[in-house]
Amino acid sequence: MGLKIIVENDRSELSVHEFNAGLITAGRAPDNDLVLPERNVSRHHFQLELLDKRIVIEDRGSYNASFVNGKEIAGKVEIAVGDIITVGDYSIYLDQDDEEEGGASLSREIDASPKTAETDLLMAKSGVIGGRVFAIKGAETVIGAHAGADVYLGRPDIPDVYAKIIFDGNIFLLIRGVRDKDHPLIVNGMKIESIDLRHGDEVQVADFLFDYIEKGQEYNPYQYLIAADEERRRRLREDLDEKKIRSLRDEDEVTEVTKRAEKTRQVVRSRRSLLILLLLSAAVLLGVTILAKSGYLPIDLPSFFQSLF
């Protein structure tokens, strides 16, 4: 099952992007599947996951938030073709074909041959980002959960800046970003504060594993991409089956039901108040009648009732 994404910018210019993968990342950084270069888009803004013709969107901790049909989303939300995603100055529309379910043919679509690194890289080997490669270039590469991180690890238990790779013009130096014993930085099985990176070094950040690949060296992400896609699909299916992921359709339906229920409650309260008022009025009239007939209240009853009605 493929997904067609139509992007409209603030100049009403349209671009069409087609994807067959089960996970699509979007943001300003060039390592995203869908690159949205405007400055009011975070480097890693949101992602889409596909499973059995179902689409799930998740904001990745962006600065300006993600909106669907004008509503800001939080966490994972199930959406559908016809919904409009708004990110910064972009309006994003979805279209879906009727081919096999998303990600089912991933193993046939990925080139299994080795690649040659065009720049120094970190290649993820575990988790749902397994097989993704992150270019290390510039003076500083940030690894963490912040939406602006170069190596984005979008989990709430991970610090915004877990580690950094600093380039001094000669070597790449990996350093810890937090001084917290609960978040150690591990290279080749040893806890470190800083280290010069060498080709083949295994870097562990929380439970994410990476291989450091030097420019010009061969690497092959195939097995990690397949394992990551299977793990992502398994987790997504469990969350959908257990209704841990909210549906935008369910929210809209609940909103309408709530409105109708509140209107019904208002009618019932109004009728109850009117009934209480009538009962109190009847009780007062009965009391006046009894007192008048007993001689305790010197009034002419016919004249009294005539004045009321």
Image (cartoon, rainbow, N blue to C red):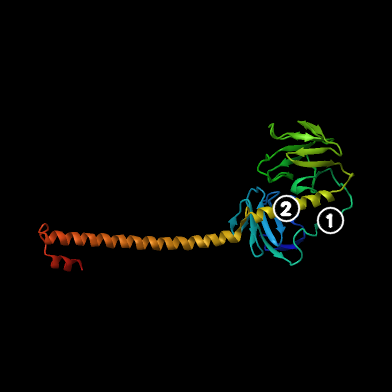
The number of numbered discs placed on residues in the rendered structure image is: 2
User: In the drawing, does residue 93 fall left or right of residue 288?
Assistant: right
Query: What is the quadrant of the C terminus in the image?
Result: bottom left
User: In the drawing, does residue 280 fall left or right of residue 75?
Assistant: left
The Cα atoms of the two marked residues, 1 and 2, are separated by: 20 Å
Kindly identify the amino acid type of the residue bearing the numbered disc 1.
Ile
Q: Which mark is residue 110?
A: 1
User: In the drawing, does residue 277 fall left or right of residue 300?
Assistant: right
Query: Residue 207 is drawn in which quadrant?
Result: top right
| Residue 164 in the image, given as x and y percentages of width and height | 75, 37
| Residue 69 in the image, given as x and y percentages of width and height | 60, 60
Q: Which residue is mark 2?
A: 234
Query: What is the quadrant of the N terminus in the image?
Result: bottom right
Q: Nearest to the eye among marks 1 and 2: give it.
A: 2
Q: Residue at x 42, y 60 (%)?
A: 265
Q: Is residue 8 visible?
A: no
Q: Dot 1: within a 10 Å radius of its alpha carbon, few (fewer than 14), some, or many (20 or more) residues?
A: few
Q: Residue at x 70, y 51 (%)?
A: 235
Q: Is residue 220 visible?
A: yes
Q: Residue at x 71, y 58 (%)?
A: 50
Q: Which mark is residue 230?
A: none
Q: Is residue 209 above or below residue 51?
A: above
User: Is 137 or 158 nearer to us in this picture?
Assistant: 158
